[in-house]
Amino acid sequence: MEVLERLGLRVRDLFDAPAAPTAGRAHRRVEPAIADRAILAAGLPLSVHKKDFGPRIGKPRRMAGYIYRWPDGSPAGCVVRVRALHRQGYVKSFYQQRRTETGWEFGGFERLPFHLPEVIEAVAAGQDIFVCEGEADVLTATHAGLTATCNAGGASGWYREHGRWLRGARRVWVVADRDAPGYRHAVKVAESLVDSVAEIRVVQARDGKDLTDHCNAGHQISELDPVPVLDEHYRPVRGPVEVVTARW
């Protein structure tokens, strides 16, 4: 500053054009990402904070194992669901195993959709396919007589490698969990499919968080609700489409 004062200059004289005054400046509205727009439209918080269940007081127990298979039906990997008792409730967690020539080993496996052989058959037959966030919801849909799939790793685990197995599908229903991670997962799924399937719908549970909650509340699959913003954004511009009949 002393050098500038001796030269009779001010800081703004060092720049080609003076900075615009900030007082009274109108702030330009930045358009949020499509997922954030949908989250806000649904009245949901943009972030989810995990509840603190306190210290663990019980030994973790394996509750389920979900086998991921190659197109020929041979196992590629497994997602294991674990539950542990904490002071203020149960906490679930997951870990992965991969199939090798010598047996099962801890660690991730190839990016394959759950129930891949059934997905391939559904694509070839022109049947609807439901993409859920987790394996339990896939089993719920399967129990209802539908073809469904998901990815390992939860809301953040979908990649384009998963989507390539659905190329050529007639219609894909993306079932979003009713929270910010669920909506963002739905966008990742839809974006990976938008140029390779004939039709995409983005729906959610009428009651509860996910497809299993929806069915346990007594609703039919046909009663899934469109996700605000997302369903309109990704579905083709034509008349309404009926959800396929399920045996739930």
Image (spheres, grey):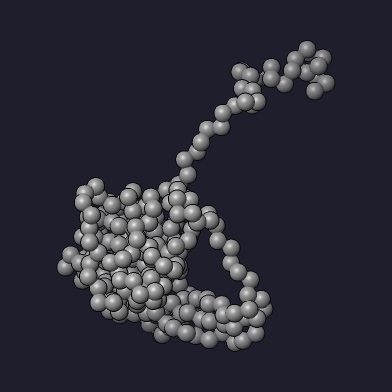
Q: Locate residue 77: give its quadrant.
A: bottom left
* Residue 169 left/right relative to 135: left
Name the residue at the front extreme. Answer: 218
Q: Locate residue 168: give its quadrant.
A: bottom left
Q: Residue at x 52, y 76 (%)?
A: 93
The reply to whether residue 213 is in sight is yes
Q: Locate residue 52: give its quadrant.
A: bottom right
Q: Nearer the viewer, residue 140 or 127?
A: 140
Name the residue at the top extreme. Answer: 8
Q: Residue at x 51, y 36 (%)?
A: 29
* Number of numbered discs overlaid on the protein picture: 0
Q: Nearer the viewer, residue 8 or 238?
A: 238
* Residue 50 left/right relative to 76: right
Residue 235 % position (x, y): 28, 52
Residue 33 % position (x, y): 45, 47
Relative to 71, residue 59 above or below: below
Q: Residue at x 82, y 14 (%)?
A: 6
In the rendered image, the quadrant that contains the C terminus is: bottom left
Name the residue at the left extreme. Answer: 125
Q: Nearer the viewer, residue 131 or 45?
A: 45
* Residue 199 left/right relative to 42: left
The reply to whether residue 133 is in sight is no
In the rendered image, the quadrant that contains the N terminus is: top right
Residue 151 % position (x, y): 39, 68
Q: Residue at x 51, y 81 (%)?
A: 82
Residue 215 % position (x, y): 36, 74
